[in-house]
Amino acid sequence: MRPEILNSLFRPVSSLKGVGPKLARAFERLLDPPDGQEPLVVDLLFHLPSGVIDRRLQPGVARAPHGAIVTLTLRIDRHEAPRPGSRTPYKVFGQDETGEVALVFFAGRADWLAKLAPVGSTRIVSGRAEWFNGRPQIAHPDYVLPPEESERLPLVEPVYPLTEGIGLRTIGRAVASALESLPELPEWLDGPLLARRGWPAFREALARLNRADTPEELALDAPSRARLAYDELLASQLALALVRARLRRPSGRARVPTGARTALLDRALPFRLTASQVAAIAEVGADLAAPVRMLRLLQGDVGSGKTMVALYAMAMAAEAGGQSALMAPTELLARQHLAAIGPLAEAAGLKAAILTGRERGRERAAVLEGLADGTIDILVGTHALFQGEVAFKALALAVVDEQHRFGVHQRLALTDKGAHVDILVMTATPIPRTLVLSAFGDMDVSKLTEKPAGRRPIDTRSLPIERLDDVVERLRAAIAGGQKAYWICPLVEESETSDLAAAESRHATLAEALGPRVGLVHGRMKAADKDAAMAAFRDGRTAVLVATTVVEVGVDVPDATIIVIEHAERFGLAQLHQLRGRVGRSDRPSVCLLLYRGPLGETAHARLDVMRRTNDGFLIAEEDLRLRGEGELLGTRQSGTPGFRIADLSVHAQLVEIARDDARLVLATDPDLAGPRGTALRLLLHLFRRDAAVRLLRSG
């Protein structure tokens, strides 16, 4: 149950004065509430201004600076209506003691303008001054008021992000009404922190931001904005800490590895593990042996050997008498995982099987039977593993590949398949520490920082699209010499709204130039056709694979040494790095060619420059966070990764660690949030829609 004190904030925006059904629909587009819910007053209050309009400049007509917002007191001299059929605007001329200005109205109605600014009257006019041919004008002034209504002119006006159907005055009135209904809430922040930072109370912070006089008051690091950013980060960290506390209650299920299976793996491996792989395996072993549930994030750059760490983890789970599930985001990757770990698992005496949407009939029944009777040690699959009919005899470990493709709910659903299931999640997207804490604050973290022995850095170059013919000739020579190449295109087919090269048309042009050894794979193909195209490329029946970003993660063709990324300027840094990781997977020199269409914007130029300078995925991730912000870095916002409305991790990074420590301290001293501060923190969780975390509390 939501506390009654919050009822005024959790009513629909449509309940505010002046917001009818039509405006409510526009507010829904603007505020984008979660899960298709109608927008609430609290959503409006967190839709903060992005700037201010200052109308205090009153220079007189002759001294009005070009492009500045000015306020003028004018005597209206004359109206100049356009001739019938003419496209010229309607003009109203006014003057003060310094000169004359034209008020310009496109498609202006004469009767309305005659009432707005009657000839001979005095009017206060505010808008943006522009000078053309030595004459000043104001196009569509924001305000035209008689002097007796001057109090209606806001001298300083906040500017909000808008959408079609909502103007500044409309949102300003709605926010003012919302602020009036904001109750006095108890303080949930730690007193010494509040004093040290000089932050205002929650209610005062919202009021100050929505009534700001200067752009400085709205800066991301200004006290009011920082206070609300910290509130949002604390709500997020507290929710993660509550999930962690629930998952990690002592279970009495210490799974102590014996070392028998991992010793067999050591002997079967055709290479030596890196030092960071050995360290990660030791951390996982210690987690399994502890009487609390493991919740570990394994992050490593492309090709750093995460799958091997997962295999050792699953072998240790089997040593302790348990089964493991390894979940991949796509069927293609699930089958690749099985191909990679199957022979090694067999050498260690482990039985591995796969379960995707493709397994049917007897084959599926045999897998389900093997899971139920415990003869299958490792199950590899996709989201099909969530289905109710899939029952394990003793699921001990869930390994989730590419964590950001799976929401928290799916993570919990998988653990429901067994009692006190340990969780290891892997990502090949290197994540900055700040983002690890904000998105995965409930997890311990292991990092793989080395590449397997013998791997070389990838030579990365950028070329304008005009040199496409040179690239094709370079490919012709490379495949004649026995090399393989990827060619990445962002779209599947031609679109009227985009000039991006489409995979199907690029496949046709390359096949014409290079012959029949050009394959094609994209997201709209059937799974079996995708697998066949990948197999043909892997086996050498095709030498060039034209693909969309379906090959972004996990696909492993060690003898592919060239990747061409077309329209590289349209990709984010993390995605470019992921794609580049498809090559450089052997001891042969590899090349990544970034084809771009100029002129490049500042951000696109910076991205390509970073790609040329470094192969370090963690450095690239930090740059991507700086260039793009956290919202896009891990993929879609609705995937379980928090997309913050107020906090900006490129500015508020240091607050994340403070919030995490604060949340852990709170739960250590008041695990049920029953004390005075705990009760206030429950309000905070509701305000930032972390209601699910409140339901995890034992006391409700």
Image (cartoon, rainbow, N blue to C red):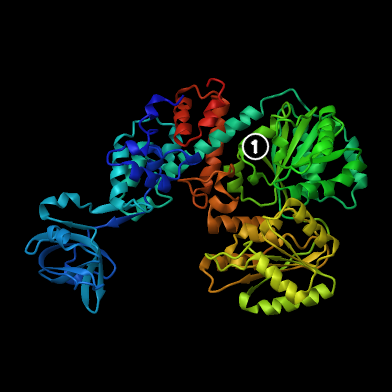
Indicate whether 466 appears above or below 139.
below
Q: Which residue is outermost to the top?
A: 699
- Judging depth in this view, the residue of 15 and 642 nearest the camera is 15
Residue under label 1:
410
Label tally? 1
The structure residue drawn at horizontal position 40% and vertical position 49%, both measured from the top left corner, is 222
Indicate whether 435 appears above or below 497.
above
Decide if residue 470 is in sight here: yes
**Crowd band around label 1 with a 10 angstrom C-alpha radius: few (<14), some (14–19), many (20+):** some
Rendered location of residue 497, percent (x, y): 52, 64
Rendered location of residue 680, percent (x, y): 44, 28
Image quadrant assignment for residue 326: top right
Q: Secondary structure at mark 1?
A: helix
540 sits left or right of 104 in the view: right
150 sits left or right of 38 in the view: left
- Judging depth in this view, the residue of 77 and 301 nearest the camera is 77
The structure residue drawn at horizontal position 19% and vertical position 62%, both measured from the top left corner, is 109
